[in-house]
Image: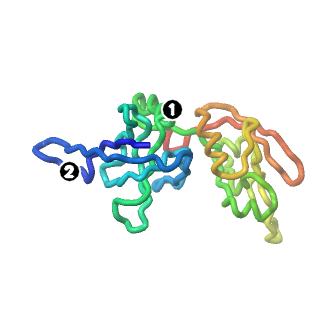
Amino acid sequence: LDRAGFCSPLSFLYIGCVTSFIHHQSIIGLRREISSAATGRPIQDVIQTDAAINPGNSGGPLLDSSGSLIGINTAIYSPSGASSGVGFSIPVDTVNGIVDQLVKFGKVTRPILGIKFAPDQSVEQLGVSGVLVLDAPPNGPAGKAGLLSTKRDAYGRLILGDIITSVNGKKVSNGSDLYRILDQCKVGDEVIVEVLRGDQKEKIPVKLEPKPDET
């Protein structure tokens, strides 16, 4: 599928005007996942294109052949470090979900559980599916609700914390699942977190809060 992207590569200015370039692109894949360079948080359901993205392209529109917006050019994976490789765009539906916050507040405030969790591989080695809570600070939403952190006993033996297996009835197999569910929630929402605690399952209500630096 042919697509076009508008941009101002490398922020070039000519006679006081921004020069725009049109790149004819093709959609390579959908529902890809990349990580934010700033936070490490996964960005899900992105569009993969063959766009050549330079500094300045990020934030430019990805249009279809009729001129309709379908995404926002966001990042590139380039093994060589040059502006060629695999490009990624955030879908317009995702943008629509946050644009009101950007217009009203100038930023996006996302809800959090307030936990640190183990790498997915660590949980897989335990032979279970879910997200292992490493730390649930007592002043965070999960800690206030009573989720248990991983710790060591007086003899140095590891005592596993809660393993989150679902949120609001939606299965959580890994960290990406957890982020995907939370991205559909709002600050102030109360969610039901199902955890595996030892060999027992428990359902715990947790009221989501904003990140401390987003209040």
Q: Amino acid at mark 1?
A: Gly
Q: Which residue is mark 2?
A: 12
The tag on residue 122 is: none
The tag on residue 97 is: 1
Q: Position of residue 17 (x, y in %)?
A: 16, 41
Answer left or right for 123 relative to 184: right
Q: Amino acid at mark 2?
A: Phe
Q: Is residue 171 above or below residue 79?
A: above
Q: Earlier in the sequence, mark 1 or mark 2?
A: 2
Q: Is residue 115 above or below residue 192?
A: below
Answer left or right for 45 relative to 192: left
The local secondary structure at tag 1 comes to: loop
- Mark 1 and mark 2: Cα distance apart in space: 31 Å
Q: Is residue 190 above or below residue 158?
A: above
Q: Position of residue 94 (x, y in %)?
A: 51, 36
Q: Quadrant of residue 105?
A: top left
Residue lying farthest to the left in this orientation: 15
Residue depicted at 79% across the width and 71% down the height? 156
Residue depicted at 39% across the width and 31% down the height? 68
Answer left or right for 13 relative to 125: left
- 130 vs 53, nearest the viewer: 53
Near mark 2 (Cα within 10 A), the count class, few <14, some 14-19 or many ≥20, is few
Q: Position of residue 147 (x, y in %)?
A: 75, 47
